[in-house]
Amino acid sequence: QHQAAVAEACDPAAMAGKEFDLVVYGATGFTGKLAAKYLAAGLPDAPTFAIGGRSESAIRALAAELGAGVGRPVPPAVVADLQDMEALRAMARRARVVLTYAGPYEKYGGENLIKAAVDSCAHYVDITGETPWEREMLFKYDAEAKARGVAIVQSAGLDSLPADL
């Protein structure tokens, strides 16, 4: 179990002063790209965001596409492989929220991103439907996340598509 011996609460001022409101991780996949395009449209009161993923060439190409596609500045691109804890922590330290679309989460190392987010005082949100894995993550990280003042939100929007159709 990951639970820290004594988890320190995250500094709210430091969390509020992060570079990005959110990082869209897994932005080059189908659903992640939809989210990134939505954010790139520059809606009123849109959050500051970066796009993230494991492939530098793919994530930079998407950033260029998003900027050119709407005549706006190219969104920042953050490269971090799900097996590289230091890169994941560096990404999470820059964002208030890490919103990940890189699944299946258990198979590809989603736990590493949860751990990096909790360690780096970033909220974590995914769209998993992997119930046994969710339960395992809850048992491992819930107490520490609560003590640090960060949220772990899994299955956000799960099964919303059938209702939308």
Image (cartoon, rainbow, N blue to C red):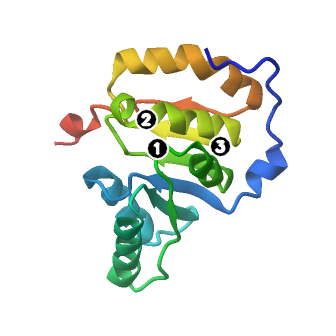
Please tell me whether residue 55 is drawn above or below residue 114 in the rendered image: below
Q: In screen coordinates, is 57 left or right of 151? A: left
Residue ID at (81%, 44%): 12
Disc ID at residue 122: 3
Specify which label sits upstream in the sequence, 2 or 3.
2
The quarter holding residue 62 reads bottom left
Specify which label sits upstream in the sequence, 2 or 1.
1
Q: Where is residue 33 drawn, in percent x and y?
A: 32, 59
Q: Where is residue 98 drawn, in percent x and y?
A: 54, 47
Q: In screen coordinates, is 97 left or right of 67? A: right
Q: CA distance from mark 1 to mark 3?
A: 16 Å
Disc ID at residue 8: none
Q: CA distance from mark 2 to mark 3?
A: 17 Å
User: Can residue 146 be seen?
Assistant: yes
Residue ID at (49%, 72%): 75
The amino acid marked with disc number 3 is: Ala
| Quarter occupied by the N terminus | top right
User: Badge 2 local density, few (<14 within 10 Å), some, or many (20+)?
Assistant: some
Q: Nearer the viewer, mark 1 or mark 3?
A: 1
Q: Are marks 2 and 3 in contact (CB under 8 Å)?
A: no
The amino acid marked with disc number 1 is: Leu
Disc ID at residue 109: 2
Q: Are marks 2 and 1 in contact (CB under 8 Å)?
A: yes
The amino acid marked with disc number 2 is: Gly
Q: Where is residue 40 drawn, in percent x and y?
A: 43, 70
Dot 1: element: loop
Residue ID at (47%, 58%): 52
Q: In screen coordinates, is 2 left or right of 17? A: left
The residue wearing badge 1 is: 82
Q: Nearer the viewer, residue 159 or 30?
A: 30
Dot 3: element: loop
